[in-house]
Image (spheres, grey):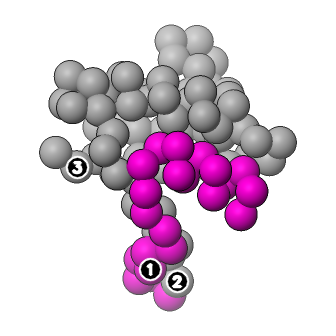
Amino acid sequence: MEYIAVAFPVGGGRLTILDTASGYYTGYPSALGSENLYRELERYSNWLSRYGGIATVRIYDVQDGMPIKVVSGNIYDIARILTYG
């Protein structure tokens, strides 16, 4: 099963995720916030565990209205890429 979520790297190794399809957001069930990249990706994968969790993350940039794949990998690869480039 595939999901589309919006993730915002907010600096300092932190991330905010919004997934309206599953009702998930960083900080659930309280206020929207940001968390450590690794912990937040693990938490989101655990949230989706009823669907098998997250096997692969694909990150896209939108240029002139077209999605361009930038990188893909498991949650640990993505956290490392977002943290260290």
Q: Position of residue 53 (x, y in %)?
A: 29, 32
In the picture, the disc for residue 68 is 1
Above/below status of 74 relative to 67: above
Q: Position of residue 15 (x, y in %)?
A: 65, 40
Q: Amino acid at mark 3?
A: Glu
Residue mark closest to the camera, 3 vs 2: 3
For marks 3 and 2 on the same chain, the one whose residue lies earlier in the sequence: 3
Q: Whole-Å distance between the Cαs marked 3 and 1?
A: 17 Å
Secondary structure of the residue carrying numbered label 3? loop
In the picture, the disc for residue 2 is 3
Q: Whole-Å distance between the Cαs marked 2 and 1?
A: 7 Å
Question: Disc 2, disc 1: CB below 8 Å?
Answer: yes
- The residue sitting at the top extreme is 29
Give the residue displayed 51% in from the left and 35% down from the top.
Answer: 41
Locate residue 20 relative to residue 9 in the image: left or right. left
Question: Disc 3, disc 2: CB below 8 Å?
Answer: no
Give the residue displayed 72% in from the left and 51% down from the top.
Answer: 83
For marks 2 and 1 on the same chain, the one whose residue lies earlier in the sequence: 2
